[in-house]
Image (cartoon, helix red, strand yellow):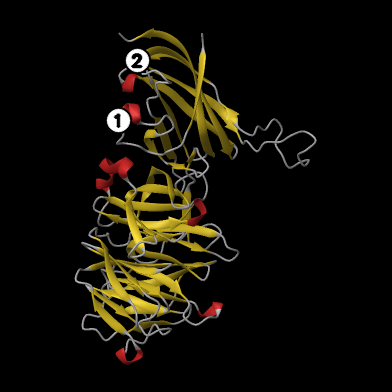
Protein backbone atom coordinates (compact mmCIF):
# COMPACT_ATOMS: atom_id res chain seq x y z
CA UNK A 1 0.00 0.00 0.00
CA UNK A 2 1.36 3.40 -1.00
CA UNK A 3 0.66 6.24 1.43
CA UNK A 4 0.96 9.92 0.38
CA UNK A 5 2.14 12.48 2.94
CA UNK A 6 2.31 16.24 2.39
CA UNK A 7 3.98 18.93 4.50
CA UNK A 8 4.27 22.69 3.79
CA UNK A 9 7.66 24.36 3.93
CA UNK A 10 7.52 26.97 6.69
CA UNK A 11 9.45 27.88 9.82
CA UNK A 12 12.92 28.53 8.42
CA UNK A 13 16.29 27.25 9.60
CA UNK A 14 16.32 25.31 12.88
CA UNK A 15 19.61 24.07 14.31
CA UNK A 16 18.64 23.75 17.95
CA UNK A 17 15.47 21.65 18.28
CA UNK A 18 15.79 17.91 19.03
CA UNK A 19 15.21 15.78 15.90
CA UNK A 20 11.69 14.69 16.85
CA UNK A 21 10.72 18.24 17.84
CA UNK A 22 11.81 19.82 14.54
CA UNK A 23 8.78 20.61 12.40
CA UNK A 24 8.53 18.85 9.00
CA UNK A 25 8.62 22.14 7.06
CA UNK A 26 11.69 23.52 8.83
CA UNK A 27 15.14 23.07 7.32
CA UNK A 28 18.24 21.81 9.09
CA UNK A 29 20.56 23.32 6.49
CA UNK A 30 20.06 25.82 3.70
CA UNK A 31 21.90 28.44 1.68
CA UNK A 32 20.54 31.14 -0.63
CA UNK A 33 16.87 30.51 0.05
CA UNK A 34 14.63 33.00 1.88
CA UNK A 35 11.46 32.40 3.90
CA UNK A 36 8.30 34.03 2.52
CA UNK A 37 5.51 35.58 4.59
CA UNK A 38 2.81 33.38 3.06
CA UNK A 39 4.87 30.20 3.41
CA UNK A 40 7.45 28.53 1.22
CA UNK A 41 11.15 29.09 0.53
CA UNK A 42 12.29 31.13 -2.47
CA UNK A 43 15.71 30.90 -4.09
CA UNK A 44 17.05 34.42 -3.66
CA UNK A 45 17.41 36.82 -6.56
CA UNK A 46 20.89 37.71 -7.71
CA UNK A 47 22.76 41.00 -7.68
CA UNK A 48 24.74 43.00 -10.22
CA UNK A 49 27.18 45.89 -10.35
CA UNK A 50 25.69 49.36 -10.11
CA UNK A 51 27.12 52.76 -11.02
CA UNK A 52 24.06 54.59 -12.37
CA UNK A 53 24.60 53.57 -15.97
CA UNK A 54 22.29 51.23 -17.86
CA UNK A 55 25.14 48.70 -17.98
CA UNK A 56 27.47 49.18 -15.04
CA UNK A 57 31.16 49.35 -15.93
CA UNK A 58 32.83 51.38 -13.18
CA UNK A 59 34.06 50.75 -9.68
CA UNK A 60 33.85 53.61 -7.21
CA UNK A 61 37.10 55.61 -7.74
CA UNK A 62 39.80 55.06 -5.15
CA UNK A 63 41.27 52.05 -3.37
CA UNK A 64 40.14 49.57 -0.75
CA UNK A 65 36.59 48.84 0.28
CA UNK A 66 33.46 50.87 -0.35
CA UNK A 67 32.99 52.35 3.13
CA UNK A 68 29.49 53.75 2.70
CA UNK A 69 26.61 53.30 0.28
CA UNK A 70 23.48 55.36 0.83
CA UNK A 71 20.30 56.38 -1.00
CA UNK A 72 19.41 60.08 -0.88
CA UNK A 73 16.79 61.83 -3.03
CA UNK A 74 16.47 58.78 -5.34
CA UNK A 75 20.22 58.67 -6.04
CA UNK A 76 22.92 56.32 -4.78
CA UNK A 77 26.00 57.75 -3.07
CA UNK A 78 29.19 55.98 -2.02
CA UNK A 79 32.33 56.85 -0.06
CA UNK A 80 35.70 55.31 -0.83
CA UNK A 81 39.21 56.31 0.15
CA UNK A 82 41.99 57.23 -2.27
CA UNK A 83 44.85 56.37 0.10
CA UNK A 84 44.88 59.78 1.80
CA UNK A 85 41.24 60.88 2.00
CA UNK A 86 37.68 59.62 1.93
CA UNK A 87 35.63 61.05 -0.94
CA UNK A 88 31.92 61.13 -1.76
CA UNK A 89 30.69 59.95 -5.17
CA UNK A 90 27.28 59.90 -6.83
CA UNK A 91 26.00 57.28 -9.28
CA UNK A 92 24.94 59.03 -12.49
CA UNK A 93 24.03 58.00 -16.08
CA UNK A 94 27.75 58.56 -16.80
CA UNK A 95 28.95 56.45 -13.88
CA UNK A 96 30.46 57.53 -10.55
CA UNK A 97 31.04 61.29 -10.28
CA UNK A 98 32.73 62.96 -7.30
CA UNK A 99 30.38 65.32 -5.50
CA UNK A 100 32.98 67.90 -4.38
CA UNK A 101 36.69 67.23 -4.84
CA UNK A 102 37.55 69.99 -2.33
CA UNK A 103 35.72 68.23 0.52
CA UNK A 104 37.24 65.08 2.02
CA UNK A 105 37.17 62.91 5.13
CA UNK A 106 40.09 61.47 7.10
CA UNK A 107 41.04 57.84 6.48
CA UNK A 108 40.02 55.02 8.81
CA UNK A 109 36.42 56.06 9.40
CA UNK A 110 33.40 53.80 9.91
CA UNK A 111 30.51 55.57 8.25
CA UNK A 112 26.85 55.95 9.01
CA UNK A 113 24.36 58.20 7.16
CA UNK A 114 20.71 59.14 7.64
CA UNK A 115 18.24 61.39 5.82
CA UNK A 116 15.96 63.85 7.56
CA UNK A 117 13.93 66.95 6.76
CA UNK A 118 14.03 69.58 9.50
CA UNK A 119 12.33 72.28 7.44
CA UNK A 120 9.14 70.95 5.85
CA UNK A 121 9.52 71.19 2.06
CA UNK A 122 10.36 67.95 0.21
CA UNK A 123 13.35 69.57 -1.46
CA UNK A 124 14.86 70.49 1.93
CA UNK A 125 15.63 66.97 3.07
CA UNK A 126 19.30 66.61 4.03
CA UNK A 127 21.78 63.78 4.50
CA UNK A 128 23.82 63.60 7.72
CA UNK A 129 27.08 61.63 7.73
CA UNK A 130 29.35 60.59 10.62
CA UNK A 131 32.43 58.36 10.66
CA UNK A 132 33.96 58.47 14.17
CA UNK A 133 37.12 60.33 13.10
CA UNK A 134 35.76 63.65 11.76
CA UNK A 135 33.06 66.17 12.59
CA UNK A 136 29.54 65.34 11.44
CA UNK A 137 28.71 66.45 7.90
CA UNK A 138 25.52 67.88 6.39
CA UNK A 139 24.75 67.45 2.67
CA UNK A 140 21.82 69.10 0.90
CA UNK A 141 22.38 67.58 -2.54
CA UNK A 142 24.84 70.29 -3.58
CA UNK A 143 26.92 71.55 -0.65
CA UNK A 144 28.85 69.59 1.99
CA UNK A 145 29.48 71.31 5.32
CA UNK A 146 30.76 70.24 8.72
CA UNK A 147 28.66 70.48 11.88
CA UNK A 148 30.56 71.69 14.94
CA UNK A 149 29.12 70.63 18.29
CA UNK A 150 31.72 72.43 20.43
CA UNK A 151 32.59 69.28 22.38
CA UNK A 152 36.29 68.54 23.07
CA UNK A 153 36.35 65.34 21.00
CA UNK A 154 34.01 66.31 18.18
CA UNK A 155 34.11 63.01 16.28
CA UNK A 156 30.61 61.49 16.27
CA UNK A 157 30.33 57.78 15.53
CA UNK A 158 26.52 57.55 15.16
CA UNK A 159 23.65 59.85 14.23
CA UNK A 160 19.85 59.83 14.51
CA UNK A 161 16.91 62.21 14.75
CA UNK A 162 14.13 62.34 17.31
CA UNK A 163 11.42 64.95 17.98
CA UNK A 164 13.03 67.35 15.45
CA UNK A 165 16.42 67.20 17.18
CA UNK A 166 19.66 65.89 15.68
CA UNK A 167 21.40 63.46 18.04
CA UNK A 168 25.08 62.58 17.78
CA UNK A 169 27.04 59.95 19.71
CA UNK A 170 30.55 60.94 20.80
CA UNK A 171 32.15 58.16 22.84
CA UNK A 172 29.84 57.89 25.91
CA UNK A 173 28.13 61.25 25.36
CA UNK A 174 24.76 61.78 23.69
CA UNK A 175 24.67 65.25 22.14
CA UNK A 176 21.38 66.89 21.15
CA UNK A 177 20.91 69.89 18.84
CA UNK A 178 18.40 72.69 19.26
CA UNK A 179 14.91 71.81 18.07
CA UNK A 180 14.51 72.19 14.31
CA UNK A 181 18.16 73.24 13.82
CA UNK A 182 20.70 70.44 13.28
CA UNK A 183 23.62 72.89 13.29
CA UNK A 184 22.85 74.64 16.59
CA UNK A 185 24.40 73.07 19.69
CA UNK A 186 24.26 76.13 21.92
CA UNK A 187 22.83 75.31 25.40
CA UNK A 188 21.02 78.64 25.35
CA UNK A 189 18.86 77.17 22.55
CA UNK A 190 18.09 74.09 24.68
CA UNK A 191 20.76 71.94 23.07
CA UNK A 192 22.28 69.59 25.64
CA UNK A 193 24.68 66.73 26.31
CA UNK A 194 23.97 63.60 28.35
CA UNK A 195 26.64 61.31 29.80
CA UNK A 196 25.41 57.76 29.13
CA UNK A 197 28.15 56.08 31.16
CA UNK A 198 29.02 53.53 28.48
CA UNK A 199 30.50 53.87 25.00
CA UNK A 200 27.63 54.40 22.56
CA UNK A 201 27.70 52.00 19.63
CA UNK A 202 24.57 53.00 17.69
CA UNK A 203 21.51 55.25 17.66
CA UNK A 204 18.12 54.57 16.10
CA UNK A 205 14.87 56.55 16.20
CA UNK A 206 11.67 54.64 16.92
CA UNK A 207 8.06 55.92 16.90
CA UNK A 208 8.03 56.83 20.59
CA UNK A 209 11.69 56.92 21.65
CA UNK A 210 15.32 57.15 20.66
CA UNK A 211 17.20 53.87 21.09
CA UNK A 212 20.66 54.47 22.57
CA UNK A 213 22.73 51.31 22.23
CA UNK A 214 26.04 50.97 24.07
CA UNK A 215 28.69 48.32 24.50
CA UNK A 216 27.13 46.90 27.69
CA UNK A 217 23.58 48.21 27.82
CA UNK A 218 20.68 49.60 25.79
CA UNK A 219 18.77 52.68 26.88
CA UNK A 220 15.80 54.64 25.58
CA UNK A 221 15.39 58.39 25.47
CA UNK A 222 11.71 59.32 25.65
CA UNK A 223 9.69 62.50 25.97
CA UNK A 224 8.10 65.10 23.72
CA UNK A 225 10.48 68.03 24.19
CA UNK A 226 13.96 68.72 25.50
CA UNK A 227 12.34 69.91 28.74
CA UNK A 228 10.93 66.47 29.56
CA UNK A 229 13.39 64.10 27.85
CA UNK A 230 14.38 61.19 30.11
CA UNK A 231 16.94 58.46 29.61
CA UNK A 232 15.97 55.05 31.02
CA UNK A 233 17.91 51.80 31.14
CA UNK A 234 16.04 49.07 29.25
CA UNK A 235 18.40 46.07 29.20
CA UNK A 236 21.95 45.13 30.09
CA UNK A 237 22.38 43.73 26.60
CA UNK A 238 24.78 45.81 24.53
CA UNK A 239 24.42 46.14 20.76
CA UNK A 240 27.13 46.00 18.11
CA UNK A 241 27.78 49.06 15.95
CA UNK A 242 25.95 49.35 12.60
CA UNK A 243 23.39 46.65 13.42
CA UNK A 244 20.38 48.70 14.62
CA UNK A 245 17.58 48.91 12.05
CA UNK A 246 13.92 49.89 12.23
CA UNK A 247 11.18 48.15 10.25
CA UNK A 248 7.54 48.90 10.93
CA UNK A 249 8.30 50.47 14.30
CA UNK A 250 10.21 47.40 15.51
CA UNK A 251 13.91 47.99 16.13
CA UNK A 252 16.41 45.16 15.70
CA UNK A 253 20.01 44.92 16.82
CA UNK A 254 22.76 42.34 17.25
CA UNK A 255 24.08 41.68 20.75
CA UNK A 256 26.36 38.98 22.15
CA UNK A 257 23.59 36.36 22.43
CA UNK A 258 22.06 37.01 19.01
CA UNK A 259 19.47 39.20 17.32
CA UNK A 260 17.17 41.14 19.64
CA UNK A 261 13.92 42.93 18.91
CA UNK A 262 12.95 46.09 20.76
CA UNK A 263 9.18 46.41 20.56
CA UNK A 264 6.95 49.21 21.83
CA UNK A 265 4.66 48.20 24.71
CA UNK A 266 2.37 49.83 27.24
CA UNK A 267 4.67 48.75 30.05
CA UNK A 268 7.07 51.01 31.91
CA UNK A 269 9.83 52.21 29.63
CA UNK A 270 7.64 51.88 26.52
CA UNK A 271 9.74 49.01 25.11
CA UNK A 272 10.39 45.34 25.72
CA UNK A 273 13.00 43.14 24.10
CA UNK A 274 13.10 39.57 22.85
CA UNK A 275 15.79 37.31 21.44
CA UNK A 276 14.89 36.23 17.90
CA UNK A 277 17.73 33.91 16.93
CA UNK A 278 17.12 31.01 19.34
CA UNK A 279 16.69 28.52 16.48
CA UNK A 280 20.24 29.22 15.20
CA UNK A 281 22.07 30.05 18.43
CA UNK A 282 25.03 27.81 17.58
CA UNK A 283 25.53 29.68 14.28
CA UNK A 284 25.29 33.24 15.66
CA UNK A 285 28.91 33.08 16.81
CA UNK A 286 29.83 33.79 13.19
CA UNK A 287 28.44 37.31 13.65
CA UNK A 288 29.53 40.02 16.05
CA UNK A 289 31.75 43.09 15.78
CA UNK A 290 32.00 44.19 12.15
CA UNK A 291 28.54 42.89 11.25
CA UNK A 292 26.15 45.09 9.29
CA UNK A 293 22.37 45.14 9.75
CA UNK A 294 19.94 46.61 7.23
CA UNK A 295 16.23 46.35 6.48
CA UNK A 296 14.64 45.31 3.20
CA UNK A 297 11.12 46.70 3.04
CA UNK A 298 10.20 44.90 -0.19
CA UNK A 299 10.75 41.51 1.46
CA UNK A 300 9.82 42.59 5.02
CA UNK A 301 13.23 41.44 6.21
CA UNK A 302 16.04 42.37 8.54
CA UNK A 303 19.31 41.33 6.89
CA UNK A 304 22.51 40.75 8.82
CA UNK A 305 25.89 40.48 7.05
CA UNK A 306 29.43 39.56 8.03
CA UNK A 307 31.76 39.36 5.05
CA UNK A 308 30.20 37.09 2.43
CA UNK A 309 27.83 35.41 4.90
CA UNK A 310 24.37 36.72 5.72
CA UNK A 311 21.09 35.95 7.46
CA UNK A 312 17.63 36.97 6.22
CA UNK A 313 15.05 37.34 9.04
CA UNK A 314 11.55 37.52 7.49
CA UNK A 315 8.70 39.15 9.41
CA UNK A 316 4.94 39.43 9.09
CA UNK A 317 4.31 42.48 11.22
CA UNK A 318 6.10 41.71 14.47
CA UNK A 319 5.99 37.92 13.98
CA UNK A 320 9.18 36.19 12.87
CA UNK A 321 8.33 33.86 9.97
CA UNK A 322 11.79 32.34 9.68
CA UNK A 323 15.49 32.98 9.29
CA UNK A 324 17.55 31.64 6.37
CA UNK A 325 21.24 31.81 5.48
CA UNK A 326 22.76 33.36 2.36
CA UNK A 327 26.30 33.18 0.97
CA UNK A 328 27.33 35.84 -1.55
CA UNK A 329 30.36 35.75 -3.83
CA UNK A 330 31.35 39.26 -2.73
CA UNK A 331 31.93 40.55 0.80
CA UNK A 332 29.54 43.16 2.19
CA UNK A 333 31.44 46.17 3.59
CA UNK A 334 28.46 48.57 3.63
CA UNK A 335 24.77 48.22 2.85
CA UNK A 336 21.64 50.29 2.50
CA UNK A 337 18.02 50.27 1.40
CA UNK A 338 16.18 53.30 0.07
CA UNK A 339 12.92 54.37 -1.50
CA UNK A 340 13.12 55.87 -4.99
CA UNK A 341 10.70 58.07 -6.92
CA UNK A 342 7.41 56.23 -7.34
CA UNK A 343 7.78 54.45 -4.01
CA UNK A 344 10.02 51.62 -5.23
CA UNK A 345 12.31 50.18 -2.56
CA UNK A 346 15.79 49.13 -3.74
CA UNK A 347 18.74 47.64 -1.86
CA UNK A 348 22.50 48.00 -2.43
CA UNK A 349 25.78 46.94 -0.88
CA UNK A 350 29.39 48.03 -1.25
CA UNK A 351 32.19 45.50 -1.35
CA UNK A 352 35.94 45.20 -0.83
CA UNK A 353 36.55 45.15 -4.59
CA UNK A 354 35.43 48.78 -4.91
CA UNK A 355 32.09 47.97 -6.52
CA UNK A 356 28.56 48.81 -5.46
CA UNK A 357 26.04 46.05 -6.19
CA UNK A 358 22.27 46.25 -6.49
CA UNK A 359 20.37 43.37 -4.88
CA UNK A 360 17.28 41.58 -6.23
CA UNK A 361 18.60 41.88 -9.78
CA UNK A 362 18.98 38.97 -12.22
CA UNK A 363 19.74 35.31 -11.62
CA UNK A 364 23.46 35.42 -10.80
CA UNK A 365 25.98 36.96 -8.43
CA UNK A 366 27.33 39.58 -10.85
CA UNK A 367 27.71 36.87 -13.52
CA UNK A 368 28.80 34.07 -11.17
CA UNK A 369 26.57 31.02 -10.57
CA UNK A 370 24.35 30.97 -7.50
CA UNK A 371 24.70 27.73 -5.54
CA UNK A 372 21.54 27.15 -3.52
CA UNK A 373 20.31 24.21 -1.51
CA UNK A 374 18.00 23.29 1.33
CA UNK A 375 17.73 20.19 3.49
CA UNK A 376 14.39 19.57 5.20
CA UNK A 377 14.14 18.05 8.67
CA UNK A 378 14.12 14.24 8.93
CA UNK A 379 10.37 13.70 8.88
CA UNK A 380 8.99 10.38 10.18
CA UNK A 381 5.49 10.91 8.66
CA UNK A 382 3.61 10.09 11.81
CA UNK A 383 5.57 7.11 13.10
CA UNK A 384 9.21 7.47 14.21
CA UNK A 385 9.71 3.70 14.71
CA UNK A 386 8.08 2.43 11.50
CA UNK A 387 10.36 1.48 8.61
CA UNK A 388 9.12 2.81 5.28
CA UNK A 389 10.09 2.41 1.65
CA UNK A 390 10.09 5.90 0.17
CA UNK A 391 9.09 5.88 -3.49
CA UNK A 392 8.39 9.44 -4.67
CA UNK A 393 9.38 13.03 -3.82
CA UNK A 394 7.08 15.64 -5.31
CA UNK A 395 7.95 19.31 -4.59
CA UNK A 396 5.13 21.81 -5.05
CA UNK A 397 6.83 24.80 -6.65
CA UNK A 398 6.52 27.77 -8.98
CA UNK A 399 9.08 29.26 -11.36
CA UNK A 400 9.57 32.96 -11.96
CA UNK A 401 11.43 33.09 -15.26
CA UNK A 402 12.25 30.94 -18.25
CA UNK A 403 13.36 27.67 -16.66
CA UNK A 404 15.12 25.89 -13.83
CA UNK A 405 16.37 22.37 -13.22
CA UNK A 406 16.58 21.17 -9.63
CA UNK A 407 18.47 18.25 -8.15
CA UNK A 408 16.34 16.34 -5.64
CA UNK A 409 17.53 13.68 -3.22
CA UNK A 410 16.21 11.77 -0.24
CA UNK A 411 18.35 10.49 2.63
CA UNK A 412 17.10 8.40 5.54
CA UNK A 413 17.74 7.82 9.24
CA UNK A 414 19.40 11.15 10.01
CA UNK A 415 21.89 10.68 7.17
CA UNK A 416 23.03 7.22 8.28
CA UNK A 417 20.77 5.40 5.82
CA UNK A 418 20.55 5.31 2.06
CA UNK A 419 20.36 8.20 -0.39
CA UNK A 420 18.49 8.37 -3.68
CA UNK A 421 19.05 11.12 -6.26
CA UNK A 422 17.23 12.49 -9.28
CA UNK A 423 16.28 15.78 -10.92
CA UNK A 424 13.13 17.56 -11.95
CA UNK A 425 14.09 18.15 -15.55
CA UNK A 426 13.61 21.63 -16.99
CA UNK A 427 10.69 23.46 -15.38
CA UNK A 428 9.26 26.47 -17.22
CA UNK A 429 7.67 29.63 -15.84
CA UNK A 430 4.38 29.04 -14.04
CA UNK A 431 2.22 32.06 -14.79
CA UNK A 432 -1.01 30.10 -14.84
CA UNK A 433 -3.72 30.64 -17.46
CA UNK A 434 -7.26 29.44 -18.13
CA UNK A 435 -8.70 29.07 -21.64
CA UNK A 436 -11.34 31.70 -22.43
CA UNK A 437 -10.29 33.71 -19.37
CA UNK A 438 -6.65 34.72 -19.99
CA UNK A 439 -5.88 37.64 -22.31
CA UNK A 440 -4.64 36.48 -25.72
CA UNK A 441 -0.85 36.79 -26.27
CA UNK A 442 -0.36 37.58 -22.58
CA UNK A 443 0.02 34.03 -21.25
CA UNK A 444 2.13 30.92 -21.85
CA UNK A 445 0.60 27.85 -23.47
CA UNK A 446 0.52 24.85 -21.11
CA UNK A 447 1.44 27.12 -18.18
CA UNK A 448 0.44 25.84 -14.75
CA UNK A 449 -0.21 27.76 -11.57
CA UNK A 450 2.24 25.47 -9.78
CA UNK A 451 4.54 22.58 -10.70
CA UNK A 452 4.25 19.13 -9.21
CA UNK A 453 7.77 17.98 -10.07
CA UNK A 454 7.83 14.23 -9.52
CA UNK A 455 11.18 12.61 -8.73
CA UNK A 456 11.30 8.86 -8.17
CA UNK A 457 13.31 7.50 -5.25
CA UNK A 458 13.90 4.14 -3.63
CA UNK A 459 15.20 4.23 -0.08
CA UNK A 460 14.20 2.50 3.16
CA UNK A 461 14.32 4.07 6.59
CA UNK A 462 12.34 5.29 9.57
CA UNK A 463 12.50 8.92 8.38
CA UNK A 464 13.70 10.90 5.40
CA UNK A 465 15.10 14.37 4.69
CA UNK A 466 14.68 15.92 1.26
CA UNK A 467 17.60 17.76 -0.35
CA UNK A 468 16.90 20.25 -3.16
CA UNK A 469 19.72 22.12 -4.89
CA UNK A 470 20.76 24.02 -8.00
CA UNK A 471 23.89 25.77 -9.25
CA UNK A 472 23.59 28.10 -12.21
CA UNK A 473 23.99 31.70 -13.36
CA UNK A 474 20.89 31.46 -15.55
CA UNK A 475 18.40 29.27 -13.66
CA UNK A 476 15.27 31.20 -12.81
CA UNK A 477 14.18 32.12 -9.32
CA UNK A 478 11.79 29.54 -7.93
CA UNK A 479 9.69 29.03 -4.80
CA UNK A 480 9.10 25.67 -3.10
CA UNK A 481 5.86 25.68 -1.11
CA UNK A 482 5.69 22.13 0.14
CA UNK A 483 6.63 18.51 -0.54
CA UNK A 484 4.54 15.37 -1.06
CA UNK A 485 6.20 12.05 -0.27
CA UNK A 486 4.92 8.62 -1.27
CA UNK A 487 5.96 5.69 0.90
CA UNK A 488 4.97 2.12 1.68
CA UNK A 489 4.82 1.07 5.36
CA UNK A 490 7.16 -1.80 6.25
CA UNK A 491 7.97 -3.34 9.66
CA UNK A 492 8.16 -1.74 13.11
CA UNK A 493 11.49 -1.27 14.83
CA UNK A 494 11.51 -3.69 17.80
Determine which of the numbered discs, if any, sits on residue 318 in the image: none
- Label tally: 2
The secondary element bearing badge 2 is classed as loop
Residue in the image at 57% along x and 29% along y: 426
Residue 109, how many percent across, how many down? Answer: 28, 69
Residue in the image at 52% along x and 34% along y: 481
In the depicted view, which residue is nearer to us: 258 or 227? Answer: 227
Measure the C-alpha gap from mark 2 to mark 1: 16 Å
**Label 2: which residue?**
385
Residue 415, compared with residue 405, is above or below; it is above
Residue in the image at 33% along x and 56% along y: 273
Residue 480, compared with residue 274, is above or below; it is above
**Label 1: which residue?**
18
The secondary element bearing badge 1 is classed as loop
Q: Are marks 2 and 1 in contact (CB under 8 Å)?
A: no
Residue 187, how many percent across, how many down? Answer: 30, 89
Q: Is residue 79 left or right of residue 233?
A: right
Residue 203, compared with residue 433, is above or below; it is below
Residue 17, how many percent across, how many down? Answer: 31, 34
Q: Is residue 155 left or right of residue 145?
A: left
Q: Residue furthest left?
A: 197
Residue 460, how many percent across, how many down? Answer: 39, 12
Quadrant of the frame with the C terminus = top left
Mark 1 surroundings within 10 Å by alpha-carbon count, few (fewer than 14), some (14 through 19), many (20 or more): few
Q: Is residue 177 left or right of residue 337?
A: left
- Of the two numbered discs 2 and 1 on the same chain, state the one appearing first in sequence: 1
Q: Residue furthest front?
A: 267
Mark 2 surroundings within 10 Å by alpha-carbon count, few (fewer than 14), some (14 through 19), many (20 or more): some
Q: Place residue 167 in its image quadrant.
A: bottom left
Amino acid sequence: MITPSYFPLIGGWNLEAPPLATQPGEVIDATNYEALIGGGYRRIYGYDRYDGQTTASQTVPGSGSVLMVHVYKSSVYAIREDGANGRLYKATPSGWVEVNNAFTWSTGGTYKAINHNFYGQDSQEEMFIVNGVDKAVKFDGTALSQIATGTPNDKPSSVATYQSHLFLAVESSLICSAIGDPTNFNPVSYAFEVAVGDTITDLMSAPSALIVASENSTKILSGATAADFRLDNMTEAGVFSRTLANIGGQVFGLEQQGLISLSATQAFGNFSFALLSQKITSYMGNFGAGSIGVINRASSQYRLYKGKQGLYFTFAGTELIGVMRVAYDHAVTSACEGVFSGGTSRAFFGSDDGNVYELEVGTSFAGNPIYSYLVTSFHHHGSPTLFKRFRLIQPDLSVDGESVTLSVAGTTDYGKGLISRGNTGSLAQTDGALWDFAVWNQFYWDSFYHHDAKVRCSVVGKNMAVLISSQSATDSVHTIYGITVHYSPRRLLR
